[in-house]
Image (tube, helix red, strand yellow):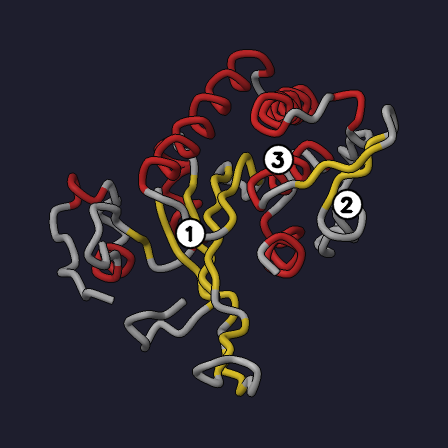
Amino acid sequence: VSSFQKVGTFRIVVNPKRKNGNDKQGGNVASYFTTPDGRVLHLIAGPVTADTFLHEARWAVETCKLAQLEAGANLMRFQTFVRKAHVERLRQDHQIRPVDLPPPNFGVRTALPLPTLPLSAGGRVAMASPRRTVPLDAQGKVHLLLATYPMPRVEQIYTLVFQRILN
Amino acid sequence: LVKAEALSAPAKTGLAADEPAQQAMAQTYGTRVLFLPSPTAAARLAQKQDKLVFTLHVSGNFEDPQFT
């Protein structure tokens, strides 16, 4: 079941350093796959190809079905399963080991935006062992966000997605 | 944006007959996806049909054809 929401606008800013003299600030798109009660299972940050979109949509649906099978109506078990799915995507797609990830926070219940992504400067993930940083693209940051805060509500993260992931 | 005709058959939209306003406002915007007018309406319908909700957040100008 689909819907859309306008969450901001963009503006054209004159930039004398650019050839055409203009910069566009703020225009972007984010696609959320949520449960009917508004908990985010997965999201796609920014515009992607149709194939990528279909792949991610199918992943969200299949992950949800498996979580229902594993957890039933138990929210904590459901969240744990979804977290594991995002952790696995980080391992497979971005070569980030589960041991390097921050501990999950299941208790976020306020409507406030989440404070920060656990990223160091330049959008890199700080690894404890061996000490190194790994660059993450937008979709990697999405998995990191949803592995750290499993199944947040849309209103808790949408500003974070636009400001920290989509810039 | 391509303004699409609102679908009329309830069976096609999946909307219940007692939701005529939402049904009239649901549009495809030139795609094969039917978008309900609000996330709340989509959530209600998803609850009834035991489905997930897909919500598109757009930061842009809907009046501009190249809105993002």
The residue that appears at 86% across and 25% down in the rendered structure is: A130
The CA distance from mark 2 to mark 1 is 22 Å
Amino acid at pointer 3: His
Residue B43 at x, y = what percent? 44, 45
Verify CB contact (< 8 Å) between mark 2 and mark 1: no
Residue identified by numbered label 2 = A119
The CA distance from mark 3 to mark 2 is 13 Å
Please state, as top left, top right, bottom left or bottom right, where the C terminus of chain A lies in the image: bottom right
Q: Label 2 marks which chain's residue?
A: A
The residue that appears at 82% across and 29% down in the rendered structure is: A103
Query: Could you tell which of marks 3 and 1 lies nearer the N-terminus?
Result: 1
Placement of B5 over or under A84, stated as above or below: below
Residue identified by numbered label 1 = A47
Residue identified by numbered label 3 = A143
Left or right of A1, for residue A62 = right
- Decide which of B15, A84 is in the foreground and name it: A84
Query: Could you tell which of marks 3 and 2 lies nearer the N-terminus?
Result: 2
Circle 2 residues within 10 Å: few <14, some 14–19, many ≥20:
some
Circle 3 residues within 10 Å: few <14, some 14–19, many ≥20:
many
Verify CB contact (< 8 Å) between mark 3 and mark 1: no
The CA distance from mark 3 to mark 1 is 16 Å
Amino acid at pointer 1: Pro
Placement of A112 over or under A153, stated as above or below: below
Residue A11 at x, y = what percent? 50, 80
Left or right of A90, for residue B42 = left
Residue B66 visible? The answer is yes
